[in-house]
Image: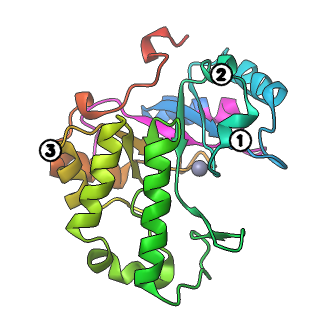
């Protein structure tokens, strides 16, 4: 693995029973990166209400990590008080849970996601991406430009310059940073260079749930070099690293 040009922050790390906070901190120490932890606000199995959110924040506050949220559904923030949300260091949202006209959701990261009509899918997907970028109170757009496996080979055809520009304009209008997603290696280098030209900020994200994956930024460092990204091009969470214990 190439030596990073600066100390990176992985803002997309999930804790798990087999990957508790002290393991995450040990990985960060060992591999030389800073940590941002995210958890999902969600009505049934995630952070459900203010009590859960307060508990989550209190649990992580003693540690030198950024405390983030990763919502999945539109209008997620209605379940929480503004005061409590202001205590969160950043919000990262991805468009992978795609609402369907019948009220169901297409989970586009699942391998067996079926896309009968790629063009129709793209129209629906673009509307969802723009809906998030234009309306949701978020700081980072996660898994940008990711496509379901069955149409991934058409990435460069489906992601036209016009569509890329629309995403960039919408993110820029609300100062939303673009995640450089390590797990799916998205978005592509051209998009990242294009976003940099438009003054967008970036955030590294591995979507790790294990110590081997957290902070492992191989694609991330590749595009840092290819697009000439500097520390100034990266998003800074509300509570800066210098105030971390
Ligand atoms: Zn995640």
Name the residue beneath numbered marker 3. 197
Say what secondary structure mark 3 lies in. helix
Q: Which circle marks residue 82 in the picture?
A: 2
Q: Is mark 2 within 8 Å of ligand 1?
A: no
Q: Is 42 positioned to the left or the right of 237 in the image? A: right
Say what secondary structure mark 1 lies in. loop
Say what secondary structure mark 2 lies in. helix
Name the residue beneath numbered marker 1. 41
The residue segment tinted magenta is 1-24
Mark 3 Cα within 10 Å, few/some/many (few <14, many 20+)? few
Residue drawn at x 42%, y 53% as measured from the top left: 181
User: Which is closer to the viewer, label 2 or label 1?
Assistant: 2
Question: Where on the picture, by quarter, is residue 241?
Answer: top left
- What is the quadrant of the C terminus in the image? top right
Residue drawn at x 52%, y 35% as measured from the top left: 137
Instruction: Name the one closer to the observer, 103 or 185.
Output: 103
Say if mark 3 contacts mark 2, CB within 8 Å: no
Residue 8 covered by magenta stretch: yes
Residue 240 visible in the shown view: yes
Mark 1 Cα within 10 Å, few/some/many (few <14, many 20+)? many
Lower position in the chain sequence, tag 2 or tag 1: 1
Q: Height in image: 72 above or below 89?
A: below
Residue drawn at x 39%, y 25% as measured from the top left: 236
Residue 1 visible in the shown view: no
Q: Is mark 3 within 8 Å of ligand 1?
A: no
State how far apart marks 3 and 2 are (Cα).
Answer: 34 Å
Instruction: Name the one closer to the observer, 96 or 211.
Output: 96
* Residue 166 in the image, given as x and y percentages of width and height: 29, 57
Lower position in the chain sequence, tag 3 or tag 2: 2
State how far apart marks 3 and 1 are (Cα).
Answer: 33 Å
Mark 2 Cα within 10 Å, few/some/many (few <14, many 20+)? few
Residue drawn at x 85%, y 49% as measured from the top left: 44
């Amino acid at each position: 693995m190439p030596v990073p040009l600066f100390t990176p922050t992985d803002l997309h790390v999930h804790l798990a029973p087999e990957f508790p906070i002290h393991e995450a901190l040990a990985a960060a120490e060992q591999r030389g990166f800073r940590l941002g932890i995210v958890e999902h606000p969600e009505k049934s199995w995630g952070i459900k209400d203010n009590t859960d959110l307060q508990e989550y924040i209190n649990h992580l506050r003693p540690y030198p990590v950024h405390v983030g949220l990763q919502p999945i559904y539109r209008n997620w923030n209605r379940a929480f008080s503004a005061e409590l949300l202001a205590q969160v260091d950043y919000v990262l949202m991805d468009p992978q849970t795609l609402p369907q006209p019948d009220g169901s959701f297409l989970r586009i990261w699942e391998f067996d996601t079926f896309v009968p009509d790629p063009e129709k899918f793209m129209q629906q997907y673009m509307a969802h991406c723009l809906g998030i970028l234009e309306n949701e109170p978020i700081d980072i757009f996660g898994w940008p430009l990711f496509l379901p496996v069955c149409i991934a080979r058409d990435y460069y055809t489906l992601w036209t310059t016009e569509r890329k520009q629309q995403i960039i304009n919408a993110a820029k209008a609300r100062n939303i940073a673009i995640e450089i997603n390590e797990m799916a290696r998205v978005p592509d280098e051209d998009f990242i260079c294009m976003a940099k030209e438009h003054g967008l900020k970036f955030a590294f994200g591995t979507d790790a749930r294990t110590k081997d994956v957290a902070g492992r930024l191989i694609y991330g460092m590749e595009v840092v070099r290819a697009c000439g990204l500097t520390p100034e091009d990266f998003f800074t969470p509300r509570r800066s690293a210098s105030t971390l214990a």
